[in-house]
């Protein structure tokens, strides 16, 4: 039957689904040392981007990007991890201690968490797409995340789903273990990449114009 031909929409869809599952497993395994989470996230976005364009090989693309981004993505992840730990400590402290102005400080901390989530959503796609310094990558991630606020908020919500479930509904999180291990992270990266596509294309076009102006 035609629907079972290799080039049929059904078979192409199943192939991409299998590729996403493979990438998810690679991303989870390569994130196990924790310190390599940033490189793993950058590699996942790189491979997912190529997969959506029907380019390259998922496994080859993933490990190529993992090696290429290992050093700088690790530095970025360590910065995010340290600031995240500080925000977590502040949140728990303000919730546990009854102090003057505690509500205001907790509100400020929640806003800081939102910025942190925005940074996390943007910084690794930028890392895998552009060559830049750590500082400039973080600055660009922050500026772009605020400039595209609705997209950033949606990406932050998508990325936060497993974390929120793990903290608030641990039983549901454990029940969905096969989802997290099987496809969730690559699926989330795929959705996020589609949300990022137009902003990144505009950024690339702007960079090319700037380079032409500098060469003129």
Image (spheres, rainbow, N blue to C red):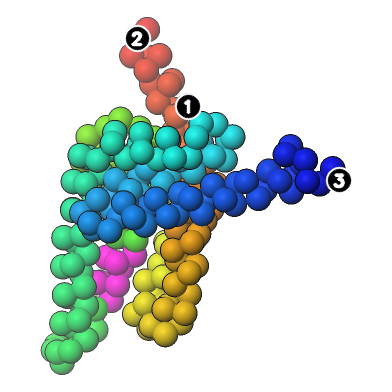
Helix, strand or loop for disc 2? helix
| Residue 161, image x, y percentages | 44, 70
Residue stretch in magenta: 107-115
Q: CA distance from mark 3 to mark 2?
A: 56 Å
Q: Which residue is mark 1?
A: 205
Name the residue: 31% across, 51% down: 30
User: Left or right: where does residue 40 sit relative to residue 55?
Assistant: left
Asked if the magenta segment contains residue 110, the reply would be yes
Residue 100 is tagged as none
Counting residues from the start of the chain, the first of labels 3 and 2 encountered is 3
Residue 118 appears in the rendering: no
**SS majority, magenta:** helix
Q: Which residue is mark 3?
A: 1
User: Left or right: where does residue 135 sit relative to residue 47?
Assistant: left
Q: Residues within 10 Å of mark 1 (few under 14, many from 20)?
A: few
Q: CA distance from mark 1 to mark 3?
A: 44 Å
Depth order, front residue of 3/55: 3
Q: Which residue is mark 2?
A: 215
Helix, strand or loop for disc 3? loop
Counting residues from the start of the chain, the first of labels 2 and 1 encountered is 1
Counting the numbered discs, the total is 3
**Residue 169's image quarter?**
bottom left
**Which numbered disc, 3 or 2, marks the residue closer to the eye?**
3
Counting residues from the start of the chain, the first of labels 1 and 3 encountered is 3
Q: Are marks 1 and 3 in contact (CB under 8 Å)?
A: no
Depth order, front residue of 44/89: 44
């Amino acid at each position: 039957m035609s629907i079972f031909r290799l080039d049929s929409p059904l078979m192409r869809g199943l192939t991409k689904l299998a590729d996403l599952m493979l990438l998810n497993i690679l991303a989870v395994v390569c994130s196990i040392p924790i310190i390599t989470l940033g490189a793993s996230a950058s590699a996942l976005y790189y491979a997912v981007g190529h997969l959506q364009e029907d380019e390259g090989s998922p496994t080859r693309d993933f490990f190529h990007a993992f090696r290429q981004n290992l050093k700088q993505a690790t530095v970025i992840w360590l910065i995010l991890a340290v600031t995240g730990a500080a925000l977590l400590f502040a949140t728990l402290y303000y919730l546990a201690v009854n102090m003057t102005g505690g509500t205001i400080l907790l509100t400020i901390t929640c806003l800081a968490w939102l910025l942190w989530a925005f940074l996390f959503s943007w910084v690794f796609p930028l890392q895998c797409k552009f060559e830049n310094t750590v500082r400039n990558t973080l600055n660009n991630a922050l500026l772009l995340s605020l400039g595209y606020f609705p997209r950033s908020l949606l990406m932050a919500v998508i990325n936060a789903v497993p974390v929120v479930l793990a903290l608030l509904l641990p039983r549901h999180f454990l029940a969905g273990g096969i989802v997290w291990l099987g496809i969730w992270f690559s699926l989330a990266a795929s959705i996020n990449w589609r949300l990022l596509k137009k902003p990144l294309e505009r950024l690339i076009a702007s960079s090319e114009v700037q380079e032409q102006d500098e060469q003129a």
